[in-house]
Amino acid sequence: MRFILFIIAAVFTLSSQLYAQSASAFETTARNAILIDYKSGHIFLAKDPDTPIPPASMSKMMTQALVFDMLKAGQLTLDQEFVVSADASHRGGMAEGSSTMFAAPNSKVSVDNLLHGAIIDSANDACIALAEGIAGTETAFAQRMTAKAAEIGLKNSSFANSTGLPDPGQRMSVADLATLARYIITKHPDFFKIYSEREFTWSKITQQNRNPLLKDYPGADGMKTGYTKEAGYSLVGTAVRDGRRLILVVAGMEDSAKRKIEAQKILDYGFSQFKNVNIYEAGDVVSNVRVWGGEQHWVNLITPNTFAVSLAQFEQDQADIRITYKGPLIAPLKQGTQIGTMRITVDGAVVAEQPVAIAEDIEATTNMWRKAADSALLMIFGG
C-alpha cells in the first residue's frame, strides 16, 4: 500500500524575500512565440500562440513522434528498412526550404538512420521514406499525423505532408508545437537524446545539427528549426538549468541570426524567473511514521541528500509538499532504507522530488503482548 503522509500548502512563503522584485514583462519581436515550463506547464510568455501558422520543418516533430510511438508499441523496429523512393529522393532535395540526408534513390535505409537524418539533418527524403514505408503514401501518413495530433491534445494542427514543405493544409500553432515537444520529451526520453546530437553522416556526407542553440547556449539539448519563405525563420528550443526545463517556440523571424538571438533572450528571461531554494539539508528529519511490531512505535524519516529546488515566483504561494511511502512499516527496519518520496507539486504537477529514508534501525519487538496488540490494530485499521 502507498500512504500520503502529509501535505503542507504554501510551504515557500518564508522564502518570499527571494522574489522581492518581479521580472518585467518580456516583449518579443517574433511574430508568434510561447515559453513554457516543462514540468508545470506554466506559460511565461505567449504572443499569438493559438493561431495556426505554416510550421515548416518544425512539423517534422510530428512525423518523428508518430514513429516513436510505433517503435514503443512494437509496430516498428529500429533495424527495419524502408526504400527511399526516387520520388522521395527528388522531392526531398528539390523543393523550397529543402534539406536532405542524400539517401540514394531506391536504396534501403533503416528506421534508425532515417530518424537520425530526419532529426539532425532535417532531411525531407528521410521523412518521406518513413511516411511511405509506414502508410504506403505520404498523404495517408499525413492523415495519421493529424489524427495523432488530436489524440495528444493539439488543438490547431493539421497536416498534408510529413516534411513541412509549403501546403495550405500544413498548419500548427506555436502552443501546439510546445505541447508536442513536451510530449516527445516525456513519452520518449531515449529518442529525445537524438535531438542534441551535433552531426550525422550518410553517403559519406557529414552534416551539422541545424539547431543554433546547441552550439553555445548552456543547457540546450533540442529540438527543431524551420524555414520557408512563407513561414519565416522559426525554432522549437529547449534547455535545462538547475533542474528546470523550459520549452520555447519562436516563429516568423526575419533571418536565422535574429532567430537565434531572440530564442536566447527568451530563454534567459524564462530562467531568470526561477530562484534556488534549499528545502532540507542532507539528514534532516522531515517527519515520523508509525512502525508495527517494533521496539519503538515511531521512526523518523530523513532526506538522504540536500533537497534544493528552483521555483518561479508564482509557485511559492501554490506549492505543496507531499510525502508518500510504502506501508505499513513492519519491523525490523534498517537505517537508510529508502521507503518513499517527497514531492513538491504546483497545481498537481510535480516540479521536484527527493527520496526519504529510515533514520535509524528499528528492531522487532520481543514483547509478545506488544506484538499481538500491533497485529490486531494492523488488522483492524490497516496501518
Image: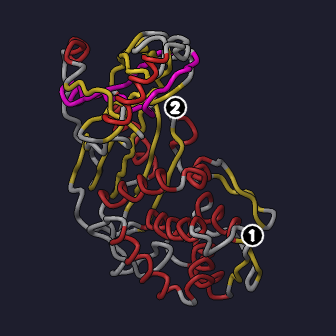
Rendered location of residue 73, percent (x, y): 57, 69
Query: What is the three-letter code of the residue carrying label 1?
Result: Asp
Label 1 Cα crowd, 10 Å radius (few <14 / some 14-19 / many 20+): few
Circle 2 residue: 218
Using the image, determine if residue 32 lies above or below residue 366: below
Does the image show residue 362?
Answer: no
Q: Residue at x 52, y 85 (%)?
A: 138
Q: CA distance from mark 2 to mark 1?
A: 34 Å
Classify mark 1: helix, strand or loop: loop
Using the image, determine if residue 51 lies above or below residue 18: below
For the magenta stretch, what is the residue range? 305-334
In the depicted view, which residue is nearer to us: 181 or 261? 181
- Left or right, 314 with reference to 97: left
Q: In the image as oriented, which residue stretches furthest toward the right?
A: 204
Rendered location of residue 361, percent (x, y): 55, 12
Q: Residue at x 46, y 67 (%)?
A: 62
The disc, 2 or 1, on the residue closer to the chain's N-terminal end is 1
In the depicted view, which residue is nearer to us: 45 or 349? 349
Label 2 Cα crowd, 10 Å radius (few <14 / some 14-19 / many 20+): few
- Left or right, 306 with reference to 348: right
Q: Residue at x 40, y 59 (%)?
A: 180
Classify mark 2: helix, strand or loop: loop
- Left or right, 277 with reference to 49: right
In the depicted view, which residue is nearer to us: 211 or 70? 70
Query: What is the three-letter code of the residue carrying label 2?
Result: Pro
Circle 1 residue: 79
- Left or right, 51 with reference to 205: left
